[in-house]
Amino acid sequence: MDIFRFSKRFIFTSFVLTSFHVLPSLSFTSFVFGDSLVDAGNNDYLFTLSKANSPPYGIDFKPSGGRPTGRFTNGRTIPDIIGQTLGAVSFPPPYLAPNTQADAIHRGINYASGASGILDKTGSLFIGRIPLSTQVNYFEQSRNYMVNVMGEKRTKAFLKKAIFSLTTGSNDMLNYVQPSIPFLGGDKVSPSTLQDYMVFNLTTQLKRLHELGARKFVVVGIALLGCIPFVRALNLLPRGKCSVEVNTLIQGYNQRLNSTLDQLNRQLGPESVFVYANSYDVFSRIILSYRHYGFENADEPCCGGNFPPFICFKSNNNASTATSVLCDDRSKYVFWDAYHPTEAVNIIISKMLLDGDESISFPMNFRELYNYNNS
């Protein structure tokens, strides 16, 4: 980190810490936006090829007794774990589930959708998904409900304390790096154009949420997708190797995103705070030192095998010929399937985001954001 960037961070951190007062909140409420990394079951209510509604998904999710809930992992997602740690009694339900509007006042709502992205067209091959712009539209409907129940003044006060997390962009990148499909794929834009366009569109949705009353944001950068089993198989990479090209593309986007969030903090702070969650470096630490974290395999997915179509499923009749490969010990694997981490990894990442230093979350970590009084 150069001296100029350090000075920028020091000045802004001083600005934030002197402008806020740390006070414990009475309850934890979060509104979750994003893709399959944080989807809690919205895609179960869509006609889509992107679903996690069959075993062994959810096999370690205790609240459901090990039954699938629509989460794209074997257990809890990062928002689930962070919410529990900060005192949430239950998880924000998926927006598309029946009768969830009333939950917005008590525990928040999850709007995330597998296969979705920052750009509306991302994931179109999967048919159904909820793009980020539509997720924000759905939140606006939830807000209208809150106003009808609590009134405008109380709704504003309530939303001011809630956490708004956005975990999106991975599918936009994956769509870009995959080979074009004949008759469907046009000429690709340059990497810098893609990065700028993604950041512009994400910023547009952040400003929309701000106009609707959101004040505490966690925006998660894209992790090193060049190391996930899907991308490694796509590029025919040997064990222990990652796609440098894909990771370089992601780093360029993350740098632009981080810079933009700095600007938003200066423009809209100190009442509003935009936390950048550095998932790239967090996941990099795990991949490079996976044995240090207790893992034995950082290359292969626990479920679904190493080669296309990477389908993770278990037959209802337990017939071995109709069941995908499943590892013996899920806690020893970094990847659950070809795209998503195991719950064991999610627990480690959650701890880092909750209590990590500025190299992990800037200008503050998740716990500090939760406890800040932005009155």
Image (spheres, grey):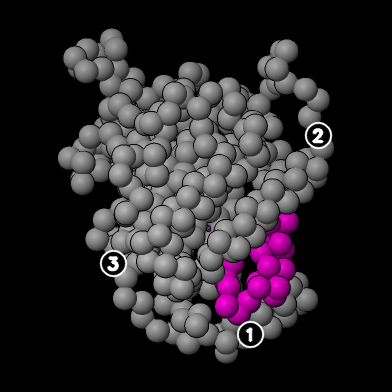
Marker disc for residue 15:
1
Q: Are marks 1 and 3 in contact (CB under 8 Å)?
A: no
The residue range painted magenta reads: 253-281
Amino acid on which the number 3 mark rests in the picture? Gly
Q: Kindly identify the residue that appears in the image at 20 percent across and 45 percent down.
A: 62
Where does residue 202 sit, x and y in percent of width and height? 65, 51
Q: Is residue 90 above or below residue 342?
A: below
Q: Secondary structure at mark 2?
A: loop
Instruction: Provide the residue designation for mark 3.
Output: 87
- The answer to whether residue 59 shows anywhere in this view is yes
Q: Is residue 175 above or below residue 196?
A: above
Amino acid on which the number 1 mark rests in the picture? Phe
Which of the pair 74/106 is nearer the observer?
106
Left or right, 94 with reference to 274: left
Sequence-earlier tag: 3 or 2: 3
Sequence-earlier tag: 2 or 1: 1
| Label 2 CA crowd tier, 10 Å (few <14, some 14–19, many 20+) | few
Q: Which quadrant is home to the N terminus?
A: bottom right
Magenta region includes residue 202: no
Instruction: Provide the residue designation for mark 2.
Output: 189
